[in-house]
Image: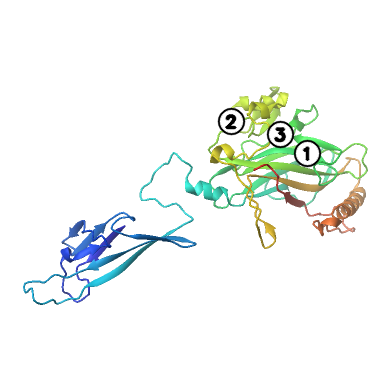
């Protein structure tokens, strides 16, 4: 702390002697004088000169005092001023970095640890063809392309990079239901683009570190009359400064060069997309938090609740988008309306036990009915 005291301490125009001032119970002496401004300067560490430390829910409070003990002037019998004790407190927030100098620590900064324990908000959206806004309709025809955007809202977190670890298409929001089709697999390989008749790929470069976009050629499940699909994606984040690796990547298959290519990072991280052994190459036998290696400790789940909502502190989550209604190119708008009504019925029946998590609006007079895109989150249950 640095304390500057004007020698006209009482505002009477009578200057006190610098030697009569001291700091704290240890009576530390002043460090310098400014004759031009008639000031006395004390400089001491927060823990020096007998200061005390108190902790409140929000602050660290260092307390000390500036002491004035006048000594007799020319006549040792009399004094013209009284002693004084001026309390001094320095308050520092407990939820922030505190440093007197700019340093680059070799340990994980406090702000990194604090931010990592806050909640991340993952989302998945259907976008229009130029990625400028969300798509107003969830009806598709075979031959079209779905533009899907994954985002994570990082709030005050340190910089994070988002990855789509896997995506699976199903006929219901249950990713483990059957039939199921893998769109993205092996820790970020867009395997749908490996098929001869598709152009599915990640968009490169990505617009932001916390956003990842990819395109998927429209498809439907053969032999199913419902003509709808849900896509469930497992999203995760790493520190933006961490280089992509076989476990954290976004790889598309380049048919022209017959090779897998990453959105960022070296090409070798995508080699496992062909063999499917990315977890082995990444040194991971099971699913763990992608931030484990960065933070030096496993991110834990806080099982407490606030206002009835779990306080989930995870670096990954499962997110669902759908239902998407898929029609053949020769089917008309009437069939689309019928399919959307069937999707509405199927969705409402499928979620009747979950207190109405889906809300579908239908207008039968319209040729194309705009349905709200259901996006819900199911946080992963990774081991801690």
- The residue beneath circle 3 is 201
Element type at mark 3: strand
Please say if 300 is above or below 65. Answer: above
Q: Earlier in the sequence, mark 2 or mark 3?
A: 3
Please say if 73 is above or below 380. Answer: below
Element type at mark 1: strand
Q: Is residue 352 visible?
A: yes
Residue lying at the far left of the rendered structure: 74
The quadrant of the rendering that contains the C terminus is top right
What residue is at 36 percent from the left and 60 percent from the top? Answer: 52
Q: Earlier in the sequence, mark 3 or mark 1?
A: 1
Q: Is residue 255 visible?
A: no
Q: Quadrant of residue 305?
A: bottom right
Mark 1 Cα-neighbour bin, 10 Å: few <14, some 14–19, many ≥20: many
Pick the front one: 58 or 270: 58
The quadrant of the rendering that contains the N terminus is bottom left
Q: Nearer the viewer, mark 3 or mark 1?
A: 1
- Residue 265, numbered circle: 2
Mark 2 Cα-neighbour bin, 10 Å: few <14, some 14–19, many ≥20: some
The Cα–Cα distance between marks 3 and 1, rounded to whole angstroms, is: 15 Å
- The residue beneath circle 1 is 168
Position of residue 200 measured from the top left corner of the image (x, y, whole percent): 74, 34
**Relative to 208, is 382 on the left or the right?**
right
Q: Quadrant of residue 277?
A: top right
């Amino acid at each position: 702390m640095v304390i500057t005291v004007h020698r006209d301490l009482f505002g009477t125009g009578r200057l006190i002697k610098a030697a009569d001032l001291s700091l704290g119970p240890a009576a530390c002496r002043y460090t310098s004088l400014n004759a031009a401004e008639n000031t006395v300067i004390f400089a001491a560490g927060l823990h020096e000169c007998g200061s005390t430390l108190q902790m409140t829910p929000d602050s660290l409070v260092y307390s000390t005092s500036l002491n004035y003990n006048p000594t007799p002037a020319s006549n040792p019998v009399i004094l013209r001023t009284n002693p004084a004790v001026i309390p001094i407190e320095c308050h520092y927030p407990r939820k922030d970095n505190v440093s007197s100098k700019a340093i680059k620590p070799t340990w994980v900064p406090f702000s990194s640890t604090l931010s990592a324990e806050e909640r991340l908000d993952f989302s998945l959206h259907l976008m229009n063809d130029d990625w400028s806004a969300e798509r107003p309709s969830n009806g598709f025809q075979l031959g079209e392309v779905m533009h899907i955007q994954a985002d994570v809202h990082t709030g005050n977190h340190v910089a994070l990079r988002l990855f789509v670890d896997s995506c699976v298409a199903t006929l219901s929001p249950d990713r483990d239901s059957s039939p199921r089709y893998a769109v993205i697999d092996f820790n970020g390989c867009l395997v749908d683009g490996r098929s001869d008749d598709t152009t599915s790929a990640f968009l490169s470069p990505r617009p932001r570190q916390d956003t990842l976009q990819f395109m998927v050629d429209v498809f439907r499940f053969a032999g199913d009359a419902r003509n709808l699909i849900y896509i469930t994606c497992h999203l995760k984040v790493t520190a933006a400064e961490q280089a992509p690796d076989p476990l954290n990547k976004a790889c598309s298959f380049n048919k022209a060069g017959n090779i897998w290519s990453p959105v960022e990072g070296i090409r070798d991280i995508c080699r496992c997309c062909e063999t499917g052994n990315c977890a082995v190459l990444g040194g991971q036998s099971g699913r763990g938090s992608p931030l484990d290696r960065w933070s030096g400790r496993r991110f834990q789940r806080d099982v407490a609740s606030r206002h009835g909502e779990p306080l989930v502190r995870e670096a990954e989550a499962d997110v669902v988008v759908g239902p998407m209604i898929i029609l053949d190119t020769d089917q008309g708008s009437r069939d689309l309306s019928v399919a959307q009504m069937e999707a509405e019925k199927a969705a409402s029946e499928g979620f009747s036990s979950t207190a109405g998590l889906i809300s579908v609006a239908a207008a039968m007079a319209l040729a194309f009915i705009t349905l709200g895109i259901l996006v819900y989150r199911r946080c992963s249950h990774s081991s801690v």
